[in-house]
Image (spheres, rainbow, N blue to C red):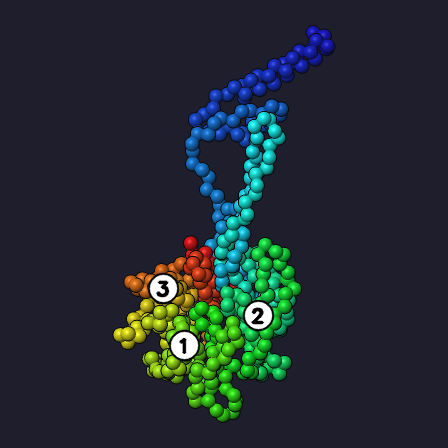
């Protein structure tokens, strides 16, 4: 055989071999349960047209490995951080806005083949939604957002440095800010009016707060249930003299003295128009007492007490009082029967909030509290808690965990204070004492 014929024979054999491999690989019948995708036959990788994959066989869906799941969209989170900075306080109110509607252009075709005409646009619908305003601790600037759509926007630029406490009244239109003067001793309390917003108009971040100062060294302050008035305590003579309690109408600036007492260490709370509670400042080793003041009749009387470390929170109805002692055990006191019920959880009442009908309580409850003197060491910052959010049904005494912020997507460990509900009780708001950031929890 000539060399030329031998080379041709070798080429023909190679072509036949390659063709045979391709044929058997392409037409190989599929084995039940065997996947044909990503096979190990390296020749199939050179097929420029690929191979059609068999239809799914209905086998099990692979389970994603932990940590590989896609992140939950922020809009779907139940727990959300509201503020981007530490806050001194916040207020919740109903704010009017235009409804968000996906616009569709409706066209009307007239008879006779005339060109289509655009339908007359209807005026936008309006709605009220829960909104928040809050004060930055560092500089006193006020920010705002809606609860269902967190879009933080600065509302005022008036600077008041190092605000320690802030309250909002009159549907978010008034603000009370408390800080220390430059001597780091004198407490000053400023009451200001916020500018009105034009619905649908441009909002500015350069609004100013106009107002005046209350007497210096106010030791305690609380807002009325309807947020239109405030009650504050101060001593005209720091060295001697009685403490004076005064109410101020935030709408008219009218002040009325309703209380005077030789004892000066009080914590106040204003649950309804007929009751202001005054509880002696708590200490683990000192018996505490709660009193009730009627701001209209100016009557004052003891409710109950003799409890070490007593802290209290009266219901909106004024018929029930949450209280705890120096063991953090939480109780429910009935003013009509003078009977106490233990609720089976441990926390401090100021870490709780009542529902509007006095039937539900939400509390920030420590998952575990170290041994200590309570509430002294917690107030002093020597002990910090890691809390869960609990709900207490007062009608039947049942309790249940609603949220563990430390393990919730987007959450963090929380020592919850300043709890508040919106008008519809769809959102629970609180400040994390560890960081002073404002959070919201969607109860729906």
Where does the image place residue 68, in percent across and percent down from the top left? 52, 46
The image's mark for residue 276 is 1
Residue 411 shows in the view: no
Task: Tell me whether circle 3 and circle 1 mark residues in contact (CB < 8 Å).
Answer: no
To which quarter of the image does residue 6 belong?
A: top right
Q: Which residue is mark 2?
A: 193
Furthest toward the left, the residue is: 337
Image quarter hosting the N terminus: top right
Where does the image place residue 419, in percent across and percent down from the top left? 45, 66
Which numbered disc flags the more N-terminal residue, 3 or 1? Answer: 1
Which residue is located at x 60 percent, y 26 percent?
A: 113
| Number of numbered discs overlaid on the protein picture | 3
| Label 1 crowd bin: few (<14), some (14–19), many (20+), radius 10 Å | many
Which numbered disc flags the more N-terminal residue, 2 or 3? Answer: 2
Label 3 to label 1: alpha-carbon separation: 18 Å
Q: As rendered, which of 252 and 133 lies closer to the eye?
A: 252
Where does the image place residue 393, in percent across and percent down from the top left? 33, 62
Query: Mark 2 against mark 3, which lies toward the viewer?
Result: 2
Which residue is located at x 55 percent, y 80 percent?
A: 214
Local secondary structure at mark 2: strand
Q: Is residue 24 above or below residue 412?
A: above
Which residue is located at x 34 percent, y 82 percent?
A: 302
To which quarter of the image does residue 181 belong?
A: bottom right
Q: Which residue is mark 3?
A: 357
């Amino acid at each position: 055989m000539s060399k030329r014929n031998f080379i041709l024979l070798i080429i023909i054999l190679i072509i036949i071999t390659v063709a045979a491999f391709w044929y058997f690989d392409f037409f190989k019948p599929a084995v039940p349960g065997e996947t044909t995708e990503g096979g190990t036959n390296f020749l199939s990788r050179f097929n420029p047209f690929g191979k059609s994959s068999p239809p799914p066989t209905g086998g099990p869906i692979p389970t994603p490995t932990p940590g590989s799941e896609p992140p939950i969209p922020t809009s779907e989170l139940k727990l959300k951080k509201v503020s981007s900075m530490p806050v001194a306080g916040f207020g919740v109110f109903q704010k009017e806005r235009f409804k968000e509607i996906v616009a569709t252009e409706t066209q009307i075709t007239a008879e006779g083949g005339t060109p289509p005409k655009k339908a007359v646009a209807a005026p936008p619908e309006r709605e009220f939604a829960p909104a928040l305003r809050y004060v930055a601790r560092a500089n006193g600037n006020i920010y705002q957002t809606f609860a269902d759509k967190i879009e933080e926007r600065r509302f005022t630029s008036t600077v008041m440095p190092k605000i320690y406490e802030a309250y909002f009244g009159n549907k978010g239109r008034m603000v009370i800010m408390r800080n220390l003067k430059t001597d780091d001793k004198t407490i000053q309390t400023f009451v200001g009016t916020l500018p009105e917003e034009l619905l649908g108009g441009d909002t500015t971040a350069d609004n100013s707060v106009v107002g005046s100062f209350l007497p210096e060294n106010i030791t305690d302050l609380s807002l009325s249930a309807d947020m239109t008035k405030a009650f504050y305590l101060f001593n005209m003579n720091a060295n001697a003299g009685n403490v004076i309690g005064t109410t101020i109408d935030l709408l008219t600036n009218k002040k009325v003295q309703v209380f005077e007492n030789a004892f000066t260490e009080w914590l106040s709370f204003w649950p309804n128009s007929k009751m202001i509670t005054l509880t002696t400042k708590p200490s683990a080793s000192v018996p505490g007492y709660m009193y009730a003041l009627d701001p209209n009749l100016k009557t004052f009387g003891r409710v109950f007490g003799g409890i070490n470390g007593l802290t209290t929170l009266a219901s909106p109805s004024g018929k029930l009082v949450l209280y705890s002692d120096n063991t953090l055990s939480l109780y429910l006191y009935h003013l009509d029967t003078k009977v106490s019920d233990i609720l089976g959880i441990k926390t401090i009442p100021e870490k709780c909030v009542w529902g509007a009908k006095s039937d539900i309580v939400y509390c920030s409850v420590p998952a575990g509290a170290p041994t200590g003197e309570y509430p002294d060491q917690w107030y002093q910052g020597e002990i910090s808690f890691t809390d869960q959010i609990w709900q207490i049904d007062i009608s039947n005494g049942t309790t249940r965990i609603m949220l563990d912020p430390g393990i919730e997507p987007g959450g963090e460990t929380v020592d919850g204070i300043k709890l508040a509900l919106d008008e519809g009780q769809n959102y629970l708001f609180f400040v994390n004492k560890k960081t002073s950031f404002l959070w919201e929890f969607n109860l729906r």
